[in-house]
Image (cartoon, rainbow, N blue to C red):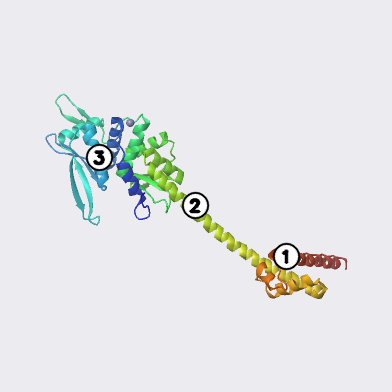
Amino acid sequence: MRTSDTRSFSAGVKEELIRLPMGKPCCMLSEISALTQTSGHLAFRGGGWISASYRLDNAGTARRLFQLLKKRLNVAPKLHFVQTRQLGGRRSCVLSLGTEDTRTLLNALHMAETDEDGQIHLKRTVPRHPMTRQCCRRAFLRGAFLGAGTLTHPEKGYHFEWKAEDERLAETLEKLLEKCDLPYKSYLRKGTRVIYLKGAQQISDILAVMGAGSSVLEMENIRINKQLRAAATRAANCDEHNSEKMLDAGHRQAEAIRHISIAKGLFTLPPALREIARLRVENPDMSLQELGAMMDPPVGKSGVNHRLRRLMEISRRIEEEYGEGGKNG
Ligand SMILES: [Zn+2]
């Protein structure tokens, strides 16, 4: 089991996705397509030289793409690392393909046309690959998450997003999410389209769609623990509220007893009520148990409660009586 509190949840999900089997040839191509759209670049030079390269922050994702390209397209990417000075010296992985391999990739993604002379023409700058099967849609969403996705830790909130630097990638993601019945929203952040999902259920669903089953379970665990903690806090607040109400009740009882004392005198009360009346007026904040323990002989909680109710009833009758009298006089 992963320890979710020591590292980012997003990284944990990616780690799980990276370990998934490569899948069927159609799905492998979908995942390559998504990674090309999120992390790929094309460079041209004279003499028909062309090179596709990928820059990835996550070494695991780079390894997976390396294997996908090799296995599905039988190409040989070169892997090297670059250190980015401006990003605090973070190391990122670069995969690059030679001219022949790049042609193979572009053909597979339906991006290139080769004429009779063997000259390559670029059809689209964003790779197109038909994703009519559900399995391929899932693979594409997974690839796009590995290339350009992040997920907030469920302890902090429920937010899942893809950054789509190209508007056509955004359109593709939106179409796929619609087909998967996943409600998404989008907005522009510094010129980049951000497509996101909110809510624990939606995020659980997208993780399942991408094939991150363990992460779904881990998120459910975090969610249940959060709910239990919230329930415990509510219960504690409720206890406090109850003791506040109890204090209020004590003061109301003391007030009612003073009322009886003024109207009739406590000596008019039966002896059993007289003692508790005196104790309550002196100790309005005391609990029923504490009051009962002070009596001679001691009386249980329900006995104290019963006597206090009788005192409240007497006070209520006096009020009625005096109220009626006041009206008549
Ligand atoms: Zn497929």
Please state which of residues 288 and 311 is positioned toward the viewer in this rendering: 288
Image mark for residue 47:
none
For image coordinates 11% across by 35% down, the residue present is: 47
Q: Secondary structure at mark 2?
A: helix
Q: Which mark is residue 303?
A: 1
Tell me: 59 left or right of 321: left
Q: Is residue 247 above or below residue 92?
A: below
Residue 46 screen position, x and y as percent: 12, 37
Using the rendered image of the protein, determine whether residue 126 is visible from the camera's viewpoint: no
Res 51 → quadrant: top left
Q: Which quadrant is the C terminus positioned in?
A: bottom right
Query: Is label 1 or label 2 in front?
Result: 1
Q: Which residue is mark 2?
A: 227
Residues packed near mark 2 inside 10 Å, few (<14), some (14 to 19) or many (20 plus) = few
- Tag 3 or tag 2, which sits nearer the N-term? 3
Horizontal side of 210 relative to 294 (left or right) equals: left
| Residue matched to label 3 | 65
Q: Position of residue 304 (x, y in %)?
A: 71, 67
Mark 2 Cβ and ligand 1 under 8 Å apart: no
In this rendering, the answer to whether 155 lies above or below 26 is: below
The amino acid pointed to by label 2 is Gln
For image coordinates 62% across by 62% down, the residue present is: 242
Q: Position of residue 293 (x, y in %)?
A: 67, 71
Distance, label 3 to label 1, CA atoms, is 77 Å
Residue at the far right: name it. Answer: 329
At mark 1, the secondary structure is helix
- Distance between the alpha carbons at the discs numbered 1 and 2: 39 Å
Give the vertical position of 39 relative to 5 (above or below): above
In front of the other: 204 or 131: 204
Q: Nearer the viewer, mark 2 or mark 3?
A: 2
- x, y percentage for residue 309? 74, 64
Please name whichever residue, 256 or 48, is drawn nearer the observer in this view of the structure: 256
